[in-house]
Amino acid sequence: MVGGLLTTDWLLTAYRQGIFPWPVCDGQNEILAWFSPDPRAVLEFDGLYVSRRLRRRLNSGQFQVTFDTDFPSVIGACAGPRTPGDGTWITPHLAEAYIELHRLGVTHSVEVWQGGQLVGGLYGLALGGFFAGESMFHRVRDASKVALVHMVRHLQSRGFVMFDVQQASPHLVRMGATEIPRREFLSRLKRALELPVSFTDALHPAVSERPTVCANSISPPPNSNATAASSAPAC
């Protein structure tokens, strides 16, 4: 599906139906597209793969990990080009929409620090027991993997049952991501949304009360039968 609006109403309705936005930029033009891939990639909590080398990095003490401490910086880093000349699917309008959802307590981030510098992170959207991972980044080796491991551990501790990663990139497959039919995904999503769990103790924390943890009425988008594009969002 193409069109619609990047409002909180549209975004929340879309995610509850298993649909996510993925703007397509063509020169100076920005096309708002919505996707519901079949198959859909998920990361099962008990299927997370942590290599020996990554486990040593996790236990080395060289990284400090926080949650919801600097969401704008995480999404800003995820929006940056991976290599010189690369574009990005995280447009300024999309970033603004997710930052607004963060103010409402819906989107969340995990930050990885080294020597006081932000070197990795991940952000996504939490509804009931469902978490939609949107993108992650790293500036030093393994920092995005560290972010992913900590996010999985946090979601498990909070009672989440589903981690959507949308499409199976090679990086995510190495970490244990698998693909399931869209019909199964939507069935599991419906059950997950009904769970009375939250990412934080407060369902809607104020902006000034973001926790730190270590270790306009608009018509919603209709159901979409869109298939995935040929390449996944940079994760």
Image (tube, helix red, strand yellow):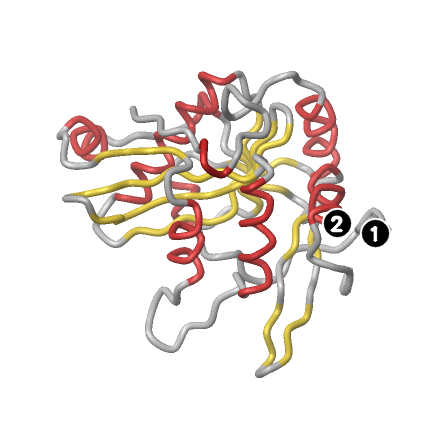
Labels 1, 2: front one: 1
From the viewer's perspective, is residue 233 above or below residue 105? below
**Residue closer to the observer: 169 or 72:** 72
Mark 1 and mark 2 residues within 8 Å of each other at the beta carbon: yes
Q: Is residue 227 left or right of residue 100?
A: right
**Residue closer to the observer: 12 or 231:** 12
Number of other residues with Cα within 10 Å of mark 2, as a class: few under 14, some 14 to 19, many 20 or more: some
Which residue is label 2 attached to? 10
Which kind of residue does numbered mark 2 sit on? Trp
Which kind of residue does numbered mark 1 sit on? Ile
In primary-sequence order, the first of circles 1 and 2 is 2
Q: Residue at x 44, y 25 (%)?
A: 47
Q: Is residue 215 left or right of residue 73?
A: left
Q: Secondary structure at mark 2?
A: helix
**Residue closer to the observer: 192 or 95:** 95
Number of other residues with Cα within 10 Å of mark 1, as a class: few under 14, some 14 to 19, many 20 or more: few
Residue sticking out furthest to the bottom: 27
From the viewer's perspective, is residue 101 above or below residue 186? below
To which quarter of the image does residue 181 belong? top right
Q: Position of residue 206 (x, y in %)?
A: 53, 34
Q: Position of residue 165 (x, y in %)?
A: 53, 41
Query: How many marks can you see?
Result: 2
Q: Position of residue 81 (x, y in %)?
A: 39, 67
- Quarter of the image containing the N terminus? bottom right
Q: Position of residue 235 (x, y in %)?
A: 44, 51
Which residue is label 1 attached to? 218
Q: Residue at x 76, y 64 (%)?
A: 2
From the viewer's perspective, is residue 93 above or below residue 169? below
To which quarter of the image does residue 127 belong? top right
